[in-house]
Amino acid sequence: MKRAFITGVTGQDGAYLSQLLLQKGYEVYGLVRRSSTVDVNDGRLRWLGIADRVKLVDGNLLDLSGLIRTLRELKPDEIYNLGAQSFVRSSWQQPILTSNVTGLGVVHMLEAIRLECPTARYYQASSSEMFGLIQEPRQTEKTPFHPRSPYGVAKVFGHWMTVNYRESFGLHASNGILFNHESPLRGLEFVTRKVTNAVAAIKLGLAKEIRLGNIDAQRDWGHAKDYIEAMWLMLQQDEPDDYVIATGRTVSVRDMCKVAFAHGGLRLDDHLVIDPELFRPAEVDILLGDSSKAHAKLNWKPRISMEQMICEMVDADIQRLKENGGRNRV
Ligand code: GDP
């Protein structure tokens, strides 16, 4: 039986990846941060019905000695580093924390692997936010980075550290440069989920409006379920490498909203308020990925369209708001 260790296991990707690995017969361990005020936030694992099958280990990406001890005990075959301060807007509010967790946390993982389990296979969650102010109309593995937020800068650091440990020490370490990927388990702070949750609330008479920032921004949105398969495929290759994972189609926030509102039987213009407070100090105007390499080498292709995904998210939010008396807990 193969053993996997996942950081960020309570997040969207951690939950779907745990589900996939359990289906494949893995033993799944996940790193969680303890807090004195709330229980472990395993709502997403519970939503997928796998909370009792994922073994949670206390720890923190900032705590190198704890990571070393954990890897010494577990000796995992595969390690997926999905943990991060991942909300771009908060990264201006907490640039140093973001640099520590999202950037330095990667070196902590790589050092712990080098010391304790150098033959383990490592997946680093790189991000399309690294492209930022895009240098080419379609971004590939070779497109130069120009990050536009402390989050993007920290991800570039983690990306190159992963490449460096591969080249310096021969680690089986791969970067997945994933473009935006969403699902009913996406955090409520991200724009897709904010919109689908608002459509559900308006439809149920719990809210009247939605406040958004720059709705002209364009993103290449895919479904998290498709994208976590690419993570696993990268670690099944003989050679580690870096891959762009994207749909190859870009859509504006405005048009994504229209899909969500239409699915709820509503009109966007009746409910939208543009709030200047929600604009960012620097914006990533457009992202469009080219995942030809992943298609050629991993035989990976996305299956779920943006429209299908947004409709699934609206339906899930309506159902959850009804079940939870107007409060969305996942
Ligand atoms: P990101 O691409 O990782 O930053 O993912 P987000 O879902 O947070 O944001 C996607 C885009 O939507 C960005 O260009 C945001 O500026 C834009 N956007 C517009 N209004 C909002 C909003 O109210 N919340 C968020 N999260 N993004 C917004």
Image (spheres, helix red, strand yellow):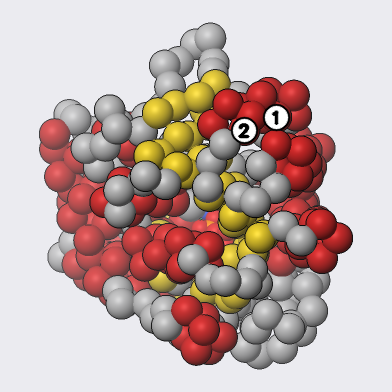
Question: Which residue sits at x=46%, y=57%?
Answer: 191
Across and down, in percent, residue 105 comes to 73, 40
Across and down, in percent, residue 42 comes to 37, 30
Across and down, in percent, residue 100 comes to 78, 38
* Residue 95 position by quadrant: top right
Across and down, in percent, residue 315 comes to 18, 55
* Residue 226 position by quadrant: bottom left
Q: Is residue 187 visible?
A: no
Question: Disc 1 residue type?
Answer: Ile
* Residue 104 position by quadrant: top right
In the picture provided, is 217 more to the left or to the right than 172?
A: left
Question: Which residue sits at x=19%, y=67%?
Answer: 263
**81 to 164, vertically: above or below:** above
- Residue 68 is labelled as 1
Question: Disc 2 residue type?
Answer: Leu
- Mark 1 Cα within 10 Å, few/some/many (few <14, many 20+)? some
**289 to 227, vertically: above or below:** below
Q: Is residue 29 visible?
A: yes
- What residue did someone put label 2 on? 71
Secondary element at image label 1: helix
Quarter of the rendering occupied by the C terminus: top left
For this rendering, which residue is in front, 6 or 15? 6
Secondary element at image label 2: helix
For this rendering, which residue is in front, 106 or 138? 106
Can you tell me which quadrant of the image ligand 1 is in? Answer: bottom right
| Mark 2 and mark 1 residues within 8 Å of each other at the beta carbon | yes
Report the Cα–Cα distance between label 2 and label 1: 5 Å
